[in-house]
Image: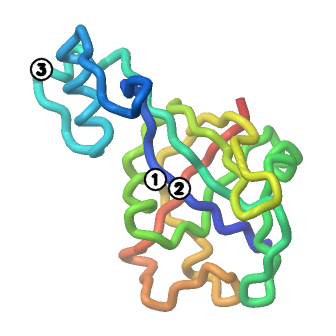
Amino acid sequence: MARARKRLAGAAGPDKKGPEGKRTKTKNECEASAKVENSGLQETSEASEDCGKNLNRYWLMKSEPESRLEKGVDVKFSIEDLKAQPKQTTCWDGVRNYQARNFLRAMKLEEDAFFYHSNCRKPGIAGLMKIVKEAYPDHTQFEKNSPHYDPSSKEDNPKWSMRSLTLF
């Protein structure tokens, strides 16, 4: 079964911008340090490790809820399609952007993600999900009849990853 191309927009943390869009000073230097480290998805420093434990990362997972053909296959996938899945859980496959793939690999179990409807009449956040499985190779990269097939990816060294997510 062909799956929708799902896109990943990245991590979002607590916004510290003032009324004119300028950054405001924070009272807790550790909080600011951890926020900067999280936004770059880099290793955290020792100082921010201790105080950054209570910070959550939220991911924006984009999918197209309206029909769109890609290589003759309809790649639509909406929040309603996710609700219809067994245990309301699905794999987030078809990501073919290197930065988005790296974000997928950087996600941690139990982190939250927003399900975002894009490229449609009413774009926006449609629901909340939770990451429930570590990154693993995206099987669609090896399926010749899949719109997400990548002939340059090898089974012994796959290029593309996916995650499993469930509705909140």
Mark sitting earlier along the chain (2/3): 2
Rendered residue at 61%/74% (across/down): 140
Q: Circle 3 sits on which residue?
A: 47
Question: What amino acid type should be assigned to the residue bearing mark 3?
Answer: Ala
Question: What amino acid type should be assigned to the residue bearing mark 1?
Answer: Leu
Q: How far is the residue under mark 2 from the one under mark 1?
A: 8 Å
Q: Are marks 2 and 1 in contact (CB under 8 Å)?
A: yes
Q: Circle 2 sits on which residue?
A: 8
| Residue in front for this viewpoint, 21 or 29 | 21
Residue 104 is labelled as 1
Rendered residue at 76%/72% (across/down): 75
Residue extending furthest left? 46
**Dividing the image into 4 quarters, which one contains the C terminus?**
top right
Residue extending furthest front? 20
Q: Position of residue 17 (x, y in %)?
A: 38, 27
- Report helix, strand or loop for mark 3: helix
Q: How far is the residue under mark 2 from the one under mark 3?
A: 29 Å
- Report helix, strand or loop for mark 2: strand
- Frontmost of labels 2 and 1 is 2
- Describe residue 76's horizontal placement relative to residue 54 as left or right: right
| Residue in front for this viewpoint, 77 or 36 | 36
Disc 3 crowd, CA 10 A, few/some/many (<14, 14-19, 20+): few
Rendered residue at 48%/46% (across/down): 134
Q: How far is the residue under mark 3 from the one under mark 1?
A: 26 Å
